[in-house]
Image (tube, rainbow, N blue to C red):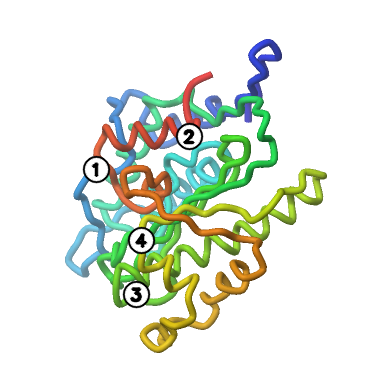
Amino acid sequence: MSIKRDRAKKTLFISQEKYLEGVINRFGMQDCNPVSTPLETGKTFQKRADDEEPCNKETYQQAIGCLTYVSTSTRPDIAAAVGLLSQYMSNPSKDHWLGIKRLLRYIKGTLTYGLKFVANKNECDLHGYADANWAGDVDTRRSISGYIFKVADATISWSSKKQSTVAKSTTEAEFVALSQACQGAVWLRRLLSGLGCNTDGPTLIKEDNQGAIEIAKNPKFHNRTKHIDITFYFIRERIESREIKVEYCSTHDMLADIMTKALPRERFEKLRSLMNVCSF
């Protein structure tokens, strides 16, 4: 990992350019043509059919291992793509390998990218975004949850993962994603407190589904949502204890959208910039 600091501009930049160069060379993609997004818009992946040609499982797993390390360290912009492709490690097909190659082509064009941190007066201002892609997994029809947390406008924590149960509606999928983000927020509050950075008041989590917000805040909806796993009601206690505050934001401004699905180039680049993923 490379760490660059500009004291005059009060910025810190972390990236893994050299490591990614090695990954690209390792999998024979050094002469590839770059692409603008890690996932092709509208492209879906499914389990390998019996009559479908497999790819080398060991090579596929090695690629996923390398990319997972990067996606959890300095490149949140590839987290959704890595999370999607990692589901097929046990039985990958040629189509899945093409997905890996596209991701490597995207990385080839953004080798110098990383996370940028800029000094900010609101140094303990922790806030987050939670979103879900309902029934986003074609094989199981489970939804994809995503969240992003920022401190002083710098991205410090993110997640993109498939939900453990099938959601029966968009609202239910969003509620589960919101609950998972709440757990992340509680952990981050404790971490910041341990570092001497105590947060004043509840941590704000932005959500773009009004129904999910109402379920989280109001117990009167219990009868229509009692089939949801009880573990996801963790968020209600945290709202009542004023550790968490949930607020609506429009889908257009939902930063966590980049964690749940493939996006068109213009929107992807906008959200990537808002995450402070850029060149030094």
- The mark that comes first in sequence, 3 or 1, is 1
Q: Is residue 91 above or below residue 36?
A: below
> Residue at point 37% right, 60% down?
132
Task: Give the residue drawn at x 48%, y 75%.
Answer: 218
Eyeballing the image, is 216 above or below 18? below
Helix, strand or loop at label 3? It is loop
Image-based side of 57 in relation to 6, left or right: left
The residue nearer to you, when weighing 275 against 108, is: 275
- Residue 230: percent from left, percent from top: 52, 83
Q: Residues within 10 Å of mark 1 (few under 14, many from 20)?
A: some
Q: Quadrant of the N terminus?
A: top right
- In terms of secondary structure, where does tag 2 sit? helix
Type of amino acid at the residue the image marks with label 2? Val
Residue 150 vs 129, above or below: the answer is above
Name the residue tied to disc 2. Answer: 23
Asked whether the residues under the numbered discs 1 and 2 touch, taking CB atoms below 8 Å apart as contact, a structural biologist would say no
**Residue for badge 3:** 167
Distance (Cα) linking label 2 and label 4: 39 Å
Instruction: Measuring from the top left, give residue 50's x and y in whole percent.
Output: 21, 69
For marks 3 and 2, give the CA distance.
37 Å
According to the image, label 1 marks what residue? Answer: 40
Residue 189 at x, y percent in the picture: 70, 54
